[in-house]
Amino acid sequence: MKLRHCFIVALSVLSSSWAFSETATAQKEFSDVVIPEFPLQMKFAGETVDLDRLDMYERFDRELTTLCYMHSSTSLAIKRANRYFPIMAPILKEEGIPSDFLYLAVIESTLNPRAVSPAKAMGIWQIMPRTGREYGLEVNDDIDERCHVEKSTRAACRYLKEAYAKYGSWTTVAASYNAGMGRISSELEKQLADHSFDLWLNEETSRYVFRILAMKEIFSSPSKYGYKLKTRQLYQPVRYTEVRVDTTINNLALFAQSQGISYAQLKEANPWLRARTMPDKSRKVYYIKIPQKEDLFYTKRKFTAYRKEWVIDKK
């Protein structure tokens, strides 16, 4: 009997140890889910956005939570912003567009100049072919200036200024960038509303402005939301020399070679060049960017952060 009792006690101890081990293992498998907190009021392009309103609070909360856990794309957006914001921000300022619209470009393309949507929108600003042509961009099989960072930014500014003249509200302008001015104007009239925040819209458009606001909030303090980047991890601006061209280039690979770079490096620097040739029967002037040699190597770069709040090693 004593032997049987000892066996039962030993089995009980082993079972308890196994259960404890299982619990400990389970605890190790799951990390805490951090739920971000945010202010009940935000500014976008100088306009106050009241997040104390229940529906607006929950819509913003959804987008902020989503972006906080989209680790790869959000961290890439911050890295790329260090390269492209210095190009885009001065253009927005010159055109009279609030700098907060940089975050519209972020959510449109994650700042990828070659981004293409299923609907055939393209570039950092995700401009449709017809819209691009309407706002002065060349769009064809050989050249697509929707992928030209500077030119597409100016085209986007022209749209935004036109929409602001129509609505007088930058947040409604942002909504129209997704849905189109025709759709927003029609819904404002049908729903007897004065602002896009009060409209019942499709899922994508109803989330759109709140996604911009959420991205702005994360960019204001990435480390607060778990994005702890160092300056050396940010993508640095690339310096270029520009070659003026007003004639057909029959072989872009040979042209690249003549400039001391590879065909791939030429295409990377000039994503608006869509083919292997550059026809130019009209003798239109183009400026082709040639990256400076030292900027083609990671270790030869001088590392800077466009905004100090983006990095944890502030200098």
Image: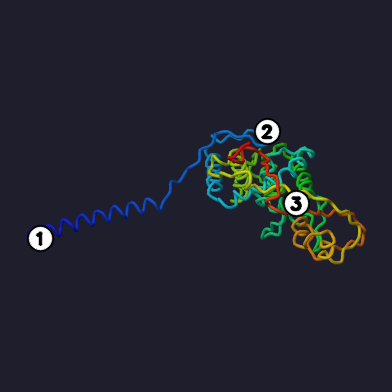
Check disc 3 and report its element: helix, strand or loop. helix
* Disc assigned to residue 14: none
Among the 4 quarters of the image, the one containing residue 40:
top right
Quarter of the image with the N terminus in it: bottom left
For label 2, the SS is: loop
1 or 2: mark nearer the eye:
1
Q: CA distance from mark 1 to mark 2?
A: 81 Å
Task: Tell me the residue that label 2 is attached to.
Answer: 46
Above/below status of 239 relative to 164? below
Quadrant (top left, top right, bottom left, bottom right) of the C terminus: top right
Dot 3 alpha-carbon crowd within 10 angstroms: few under 14, some 14 to 19, many 20 or more = few
Give how far across and how far down residue 100 sits, in percent.
68, 39
Amino acid type shown at disc 3 = Glu
- Name the N-terminal-most of marks 3 and 1: 1
Front one among 13 and 163: 13
From the image, tell me which residue sits under label 3.
Answer: 294
Closer to us: 303 or 102: 303
- Residue at mark 2 to residue at mark 3: CA–CA distance: 40 Å
- Looking at the rendered structure, the kind of residue marked 1 is Leu
Q: Residue at x 13, y 57 (%)?
A: 6
Residue found farthest to the front: 300
Tell how many labels: 3
Mark earlier in primary sequence (1, 2): 1
Q: Which residue does the image show at 61% across and 51% down from the upper left?
A: 204
- Residue under label 1: 3
